[in-house]
Amino acid sequence: MGIGAYRHHVTLSHPTAVITAPGWWCAIQNSGANVGDGESAYILRGRYHGGIQLETRIAFEGRTLQVMSVNDLDERHTELVVQAVEVVARGRNPEN
């Protein structure tokens, strides 16, 4: 479906924390910012989800996003705005 203002169902994971409800519906938009090494920044907007924090990984449509900042994390049932950057695997041969 691609990036856009419509809703995406994404999967959440964290390297150390257990996220009890790994699914989240959100709108994903490219922020237009380039953070270096070909990585792009994204803005995700959705309802509060307590599992989203720094180091949370967000997966959708073959992309993996790393959370960089979270706004409104303490306010339940309000819009949660997450800024994330795409995680790009480097040094891998695409044929493997």
Image (cartoon, rainbow, N blue to C red):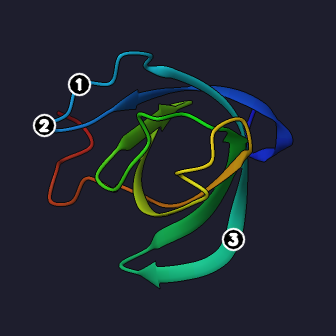
Q: Is residue 45 above or below residue 50?
A: below
Distance in Å between CA atoms under marks 2 and 3: 28 Å
Q: Earlier in the sequence, mark 2 or mark 3?
A: 2
Image quadrant in which the N terminus is located: top right
Q: Residue at x 69, y 63 (%)?
A: 30
| Callout count | 3
Which of the two discs, 3 and 1, sits closer to the camera?
1
- Please name whichever residue, 52 or 42, is drawn nearer the observer in this view of the structure: 52
- Please name whichever residue, 89 or 65, is drawn nearer the observer in this view of the structure: 65
Which of the two discs, 2 and 3, sits closer to the camera?
2
Residue furthest out toward the front = 75
Q: Answer yes or no: do the residues labelled 2 and 3 have beta carbons within 8 Å? A: no
Q: Is residue 91 above or below residue 12?
A: below
Query: On residue 16, which mark appears?
Result: 2
What is the three-letter code of the residue carrying label 1?
Answer: Val
What is the three-letter code of the residue carrying label 2?
Answer: Thr
Disc 2 residue crowd, few under 14, some 14–19, many 20+, Cα 10 Å: few
Task: Determine the image quadrant of residue 33.
Answer: bottom right
Q: Residue at x 63, y 39 (%)?
A: 76
Disc 3 residue crowd, few under 14, some 14–19, many 20+, Cα 10 Å: some
Residue 54 at x, y = what percent? Answer: 34, 56
Image quadrant in which the C terminus is located: top left
Q: Which residue is mark 3?
A: 31
Q: Which residue is mark 1?
A: 18
Residue 49 at x, y = what percent? Answer: 54, 34
User: Taking 2 as reference, is 16 left or right?
Assistant: left
Q: Answer yes or no: do the residues labelled 3 and 1 have beta carbons within 8 Å? A: no
Q: Residue at x 34, y 44 (%)?
A: 56
Residue 10 at x, y = what percent? Answer: 56, 27
Residue 36 at x, y = what percent? Answer: 40, 83
